[in-house]
Amino acid sequence: MSEKVNVLIIGSGPAGYTAAIYASRAGFTPVLYQGGQPGGQLTITNDVENYPGYPDGINGPQMMMDFQKQAERFGTDVRYGLVTSVDFNSYPFKAMVDEKIELEASSVIISTGASAKWLGLESEQRLATNGGGVSACAVCDGFFYKGQEVAVVGAGDTAAEEATYLSKICSKVHMLVRRDEMRASKIMQQRVLNTPNIEIHWNTETKDIIGETEIEKVILNNTKTGEESELNVTGFFVAIGHKPNTDIFKGQLDMDESGYLITQADSSKTNIEGVFACGDAQDNVYRQAVTAAGTGCMAALDAERFLAAKEMEA
């Protein structure tokens, strides 16, 4: 027997929990499955200082616990588990959790987020998790390195944007580019080249990040000569892109070439009526906690209107 739910929220984080707060206050008793990383990307963010309402900043995991408690307070059924497949071809919609629990949902809100791409170094993951100086978001964490030297890895528009942003805060930005050219658009390349405190290191790969609890130095490797060098920086920003966690929706929902879900203008509506998307799963531009929360609110309101219309039809 399938379990029937009014609003199924797939994924947590600011978008999912905000959608849950709004949907539960509207009386829909939503069921939220937290996914593989409960709380989303903020659970690997040590200090959040740019979310309104926290004048002294807040620890990322604690912030997500606060979001969860608020959602549960209004009646959200928060569950640990991973939605492994969905069927949006018939109504009510169907979803499988951990390949064994079957759900029937009258509406679905997708907030599966996106995952930063990493270099794959052990030291990188360790220092990113404990707030030791490695980050995948300059806008989130750049302020902590005000007046210091930092490095940015990447050669695309994201890397160029992050390097330019950091150049306004930090004394010097070292941009580490693997080849002898950048993939960024011409205008972004020009901005980088015209910024005096950005130094580009061409044909450069990161071999290791040295430091137990915080960065001490970065070991670089020249891809042409094989020569090793050291770089003394306090911050290390990985800007090689993000991957939206949307694979299970392929073939059913419209998405762009990178896998981000496409929503209708000024709404959270996908190409399937009754299925809504919010947060980083559909946002490859802003990727901030506050914007994710805003789209989570939109998704819940859109789902509420959809369900109200369905009820009137019945």
Image (cartoon, helix red, strand yellow):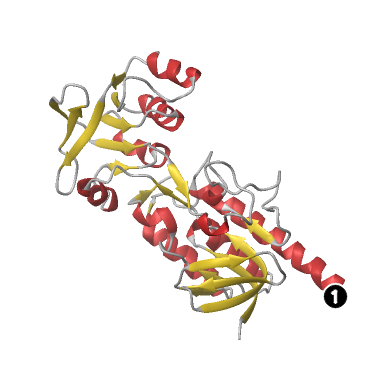
Residue 109 sits in quarter: bottom right
Residue 2 position, x and y percent, is: 61, 82
Write the residue at 44% across / 52% down: 54
Between 196 and 219, the one lying in front of the other is 219
Viewed as shown, does residue 138 lie left or right of 248? left
Write the residue at 50% across / 18% down: 187
In the displayed image of the protein, which residue is found farthest to the right? 313
Q: How many marks?
A: 1
Viewed as shown, does residue 172 lie left or right of 90? left
Residue 60 position, x and y percent, is: 38, 55
| Residue named by callout 1 | 314
User: In the displayed structure, would residue 245 be above or below residue 136?
Assistant: below
The kind of residue on which mark 1 rests is Ala
In the displayed image of the protein, which residue is found farthest to the front? 251
Write the residue at 28% across / 21% down: 202
User: In the displayed structure, would residue 222 be above or below residue 144?
Assistant: above
Between 6 and 89, the one lying in front of the other is 89
Residue 309 sits in quarter: bottom right
Residue 256 position, x and y percent, is: 59, 42
